Amino acid sequence: MAGAPTAVRLAEVAPGIHIRQGVTEDATAANSDAIANIGFIVGRDAVAVVDPGGSFDDGQSLLLAIRQVTELPIRYVVQSHVHPDHVFGAAAFQAEGPVFVGHANLPQAFEARGSYYQQGLEKILGVGRAGRLVTPSLLVRDQIEIDLGERRLTLTAHPTAHTNCDLSVVDRWTNVLLAGDLLFVDRAPSIDGDLRGWLSQLTALDALKVRAAVPGHGPALVKWQDAVGNLQRYLTVLLNETRAAIDRGMPIEEAATTVGLSERGNWALFDDYNGRNVIEAYRRLEWE
Ligand SMILES: [Zn+2]
């Protein structure tokens, strides 16, 4: 068992928006899977958590950090998508009695992958520390608004992009986007959905004209324009070069080691993710 959880260090990236930046690593026992950017938004009457963390430890640490900032009730726990580093901390918030919110596809994604993810995380962290998934009861099909008291958040359920269950949050007051893993900065993106779909959702998000964004991985806050440009460039290179490889009849294994290499210097953990991304893209694009 780990020692008592400690409150994490937060950055208040905009008034009332507090973010804990994840480390640029894969999950380990030492980092408690605290590898994604997670945080919370404080309104006049209540708090919304936007991603409860990557493990029970990570969620508990976030809860302690919230209680150092505010005693307001935690009314919502928003879960941005299915990946463990964003959602396995959910159980740490259950005693607070929030409404758990997710994309309409999230319960099915939890059903399909939950036990696989649980076993994987328990292997790394141990049973007590891994946490578990909490199925959302408030499902977003298109778009909803939630109100924390003089603070409205717009939650959008996206068509398949990074995954098939991506949910983004815009804080209307500050015009800050909490993008979840629709936005990666500095760390290599992982495609677990649809490359072309992701590019089209970035175009849709761009039309919102937000000032700044909290990416799922990377700094706690970035300028939207710069960050989205880098991600669009990587995904476009991947799309064009994978298509060209397919057109030339290059085998998938060879494509996985040659496509996208011009991007290698731009992303941490590139070698861990790019090959997998190429394989994912290749399998979809070869049926075009
Ligand atoms: Zn993800």
Image (cartoon, rainbow, N blue to C red):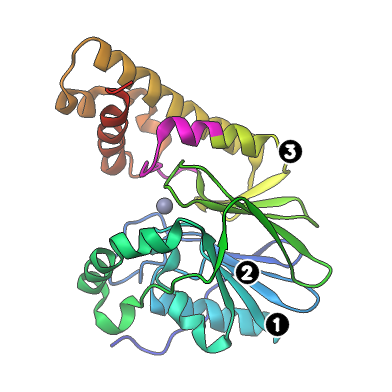
Q: Amino acid at mark 2?
A: Phe
- Residue under label 3: 209
- Residue under label 1: 70
Residue stretch in magenta: 185-200
Between circles 1 and 3, the one closer to the viewer is 3
- Magenta span dominant secondary structure: loop
Residue 188 lies in the magenta-colored region: yes
Q: Residue furthest top?
A: 248
- Residue under label 2: 40
Quarter holding the N terminus?
bottom left
> SS class of the residue under badge 3?
loop
Rendered position, 57 above or below 163: below
Ligand 1 contact, mark 3 (Cβ < 8 Å): no
Q: Amino acid at mark 1?
A: Thr
Rendered position, 12 above or below 286: below
Q: 133 or 60: nearer the eye?
A: 133
- The residues tagged by marks 3 and 2 sit, at their Cα atoms, a distance apart of 22 Å
Which badge, 1 or 3, comes first in the chain's sequence? 1
> SS class of the residue under badge 2?
strand
Q: 14 or 127: nearer the eye?
A: 127
- The residues tagged by marks 1 and 3 sit, at their Cα atoms, a distance apart of 30 Å
> How many other residues sit within 10 Å of disc 2, few (<14), some (14-19) or many (≥20)?
many
Residue in the picture at 51% in, 31% down: 199
Residue in the picture at 24% in, 23% down: 258
